[in-house]
Image: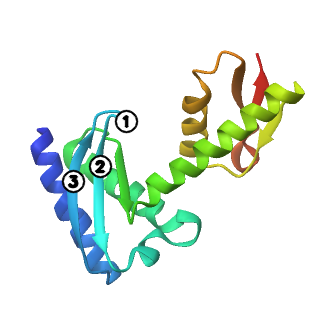
Amino acid sequence: MAAKDSKTEIKKTAQKLLDLLGVKGSVVVGEDKENEALSVNITTDDAGILIGRHGETISAFQVVLGQILQRQTGEWQRVLVDTGDYRTKQQEMLKSMAEQAAERVKQTGDPYTIYDLTSSQRRFVHMVLSEDPQIITESEGEGRERHLVVKPR
């Protein structure tokens, strides 16, 4: 299926899901070349409902859209859903947290552990700190116990 068809399908599917949730909103689908993904931006007055507690609802919405698109096209395509600039604000907060952790590690020389991150949040922190020549990051643990450790190089 061509990229244009994928965009059309994901827009229709996202709109159907919004309707099923009883959320009025408009959907715009684009390409996020940096993340090699389809970006789905939803404009709604009910952003809080769509985001959910700790972003759980928007993350689930994103997973469902990705799964539906994969079934329709036969190919996996990364889908990133945002509403009310939630993802942008989250990334700014994560970047700040990562930079503070790196600074602390540089000052103390001790590793610093960051808990309670989703896999995509850990990936983002790894990417943010990957260019710092004084720092390395590693994910450790399994399942819900998985965490990110920032260490001096």
Spatial separation of the CA atoms under disc 2 and disc 1: 9 Å
Q: Name the outermost residue toward the bottom.
A: 22
Judged from the image, the secondary structure of the residue bearing numbered disc 3 is strand
Mark 3 sits on what residue? 29
Whether tag 3 and tag 1 are in contact, CB under 8 A, the answer is no
Out of 22 and 45, give the one closest to the viewer.
45
Q: CA distance from mark 2 to mark 3?
A: 6 Å
Which residue type carries mark 2? Ser
User: Mark 1 sits on what residue?
Assistant: 35
Query: Where is residue 99 shown, x and y percent of the image?
Result: 66, 37
**In the image shown, does 90 or 59 lie closer to the viewer?**
90
**106 is higher (above) or lower (below) than 97:** above
Question: Tags 2 and 3 in contact by the CB under 8 Å rule?
Answer: yes
Q: Is residue 3 left or right of residue 33?
A: left
Measure how far apart labels 3 and 1 are at the Cα level.
14 Å
Q: Earlier in the sequence, mark 2 or mark 3?
A: 3
In this view, 109 is above or below 113: above
Task: Decide if residue 149 is in sight here.
Answer: no
Q: Secondary structure at mark 1?
A: loop
Label 1, residues with CA under 10 Å away: few <14, some 14-19, many ≥20: few
Give the structural element (helix, strand or loop) at label 2.
Answer: strand
Q: Amino acid at mark 3?
A: Val
Dot 1 amino acid type: Asn
Q: Measuring 72% from the left and 42% from the top, which residue is drawn there?
A: 146
User: Which label number is shown at residue 39?
Assistant: 2
